[in-house]
Amino acid sequence: LRSAEQQGRDYLERHRLPELLEHLSALLLYHRPERPREFLIEALEKVAAGKRGDGQYPCLMDDSNLTAMFQMLDVVGQGYITVVQYREGQSGLGIVQQEL
């Protein structure tokens, strides 16, 4: 039999709860809403809608942030970046690349 602790870890990983909680915490710190509970409820509703394809997943970054990141990676202004630079950018944002 697996320990209760291992079962708990497996449950958290299976449902990707650490990532969700980290994202929700980041949203709270970024936006600092006056009513954090209502804000979290709305964010979770957006997550659910995004998973269903009915809306957009809540995000901290907008197009200006992505443009700035691209410009930082494209230091010589070529208008494109390499796959290595792309992966470095993902890593810098904390995005884990899934192997296909």
Image: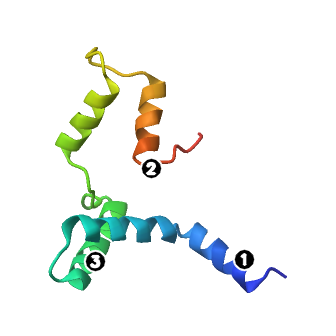
Alpha-carbon span between mark 1 and mark 2: 25 Å
Quadrant assignment for the N terminus: bottom right
* Number of other residues with Cα within 10 Å of mark 1, as a class: few under 14, some 14 to 19, many 20 or more: few
Q: Quadrant of residue 3?
A: bottom right
Alpha-carbon span between mark 1 and mark 3: 28 Å
| Residue type, numbered disc 2 | Gly
Check disc 1 and report the residue beneath it. 6
Q: Quadrant of residue 44?
A: bottom left
Side of 74 relative to 92 (left or right)? left
Q: Residue at x 43, y 27 (%)?
A: 85
Check disc 3 and report the residue beneath it. 40
Q: Position of residue 56 (x, y in %)?
A: 25, 57
Side of 98 relative to 28 (left or right)? right
Quadrant assignment for the C terminus: top right
Q: Which mark is residue 94?
A: 2
54 or 99: nearer the viewer: 99
Q: Earlier in the sequence, mark 1 or mark 3?
A: 1
Q: Residue at x 45, y 48 (%)?
A: 95
Q: Earlier in the sequence, mark 1 or mark 2?
A: 1
